[in-house]
Amino acid sequence: MGSRFPSHQLSNGLYVSGRPEQPKEKAPVVCSAAMPYTGGDIKKSGELGKMFDLHAEKSRKSGPLAVPGTGGSARAKSNSGPLNKHGEPTKRSSGPQSGGVTPMARQNSGHLPPILPTTGLITSGPISSGQLNSSGALRKVSGTLDSTVSMKMRATSSAYNPAVTNLNEQNSYSIKASLPKPILWAAILLFAMGFIAGGFILAAVHNSILLVVVVVIFGFVAALLVWNICWGTRGMTRFVSRYPDADLRITKDGEYVKVTGVVTCGNFPLESSFQRVPRCVYTSSCLYEYRGWDSKAANTQHRRFTWGLRSIERHAVDFYISDFQSGLRALVKIGYGARLIPYVDEAVVIDINPENKDMSPEFLRWLRERNLSSDDRIMRLKEGYIKEGNTVSVIGVVQRNDNVLMIVPPPEPFNTGCQWGKCLLPTSLDGLVLRCEDTSNGDVIPV
């Protein structure tokens, strides 16, 4: 008995309703050849080589499409781009071609890049800082490089870098800075009046007691001033050494403190000018000249038979200090033109006289970089520095800003007071004090 619903039998003998499914055509499998190993050669990189106008040795020409079923390939092999009237790719470009390269079968819109070395890397920027030959490789230049130009550029960059503080004055003790001007002028006026009164009494009544008292007091004051001039700088370093260290964990914001610890460089490390000591936070180079009877003066205040300062270079940048008391790390702000009072020991690195000046070409080179003459002069170069790993002491004001601990210069000068044991007058410290004594030691603490 027939059924109105169609049915069909499966391969296992079971009858099911519905029409049998039509066999689906299999999708053609597109096979691609494995990419060969190029070894870094851009000419073997296929489409990547076309980006740089480089052809393979065998160019592919367009041909007629193969008809399926005739044994040929079912795909056409042709190059992209416009075709001419003969069916071949056009060969034209709007920019100049590099020498030795076959023009490509595509149109360029500008200048072609130079041929790259076969490294397989594509980077931004120029290929190299030197000159290239015709094959794109770096051209070798014979001869030695001029180091004077690089040294001048380094010195100029340190002098004009806004992050570097340039100190062009010698840090010496001054009586004028220690005593206020009203007190100084009052003392001068009193001594003048005492001498006039003592001389008048001596001439009128032949009594010299007042004049002798004034002379004794004047001699004592003059000796005290001379003592302070000679020992004032040592008194300041003694004050810094004896000032108690503070614990940064309990210090308050705005407190005047002294911190001692190990130095770590910041973002702009320095290099000493003569000895080329790297990774410094403070450098000092001072050139002195000895003036005889008929010698030239190093400066306008240079007296005969003394050493006078001819050139000074002192640079300082911000650095970090690891406190010995608390173990905390603080940023010391002595760069960007900060007020700084350095007490850093300097060592004599070279002594030059007319007999041995030609024995040190490094010193002559150092003079030429600074446009200093090297005629018959007796010169002495002293250099000091603070490098990474040295132990230093800084005196300044604590400043906390967003959990950043800093030591900054004080807003007002700090008075040291009288040091009666050394007969030293009080003086003021206008800036952050920096003290280091171990710049010449080789065994520093690694950081």
Image (spheres, rainbow, N blue to C red):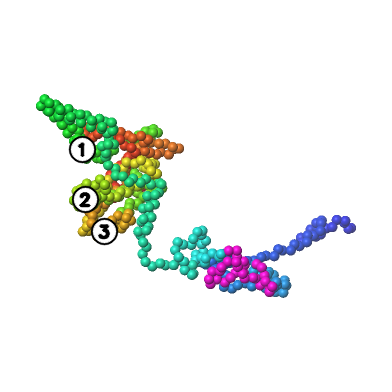
The answer to which of 226 and 430 lies nearer the viewer is: 226
Q: Quadrant of residue 44?
A: bottom right
Q: Is residue 103 above or below residue 262?
A: below
| Mark 2 vs 3, N-terminal side | 2
Position of residue 161 measured from the top left corner of the image (x, y, whole percent): 40, 49
* Gap in angstroms between the C-alphas marked 1 and 2: 23 Å
Mark in front: 1 vs 2: 2
**Residue in view at x 75 percent, y 62 percent:** 24
Residues at marks 3 and 1 touching, judged by CB atoms closer than 8 Å: no
Instruction: Name the foreground residue: 14 vs 242.
Output: 242
Would residue 349 appear left or right of 219 to someone viewing this image?
A: right
- Residue 423 circle label: none
Earlier sequence position, callout 3 versus callout 1: 1
Residue nearer the viewer, 386 or 225: 225
Mark identifier at residue 226: 1
Please identify, in this view, whether the residue under mark 2 or under mark 3 is nearer the observer. 2
Q: In the displayed structure, does residue 13 sit left or right of residue 348?
A: right
Q: Main secondary structure of the magenta part?
A: loop
Q: What secondary structure is marked by label 1?
A: helix
- Which residue sits at x=24%, y=58%? 357
The disc at residue 291 is 2
- Mark 3 highlights which residue? 360
Which residues lie in the magenta part? 81-110
Residue under the point 26% across and 58% down:
360
* Neighbours of disc 3 within 10 Å: few (<14), some (14-19), many (20+): few
Residue 132 percent location from the top left of the image:
47, 66
Badge 3 marks a residue whose secondary structure is loop
Q: Residue furthest front?
A: 204
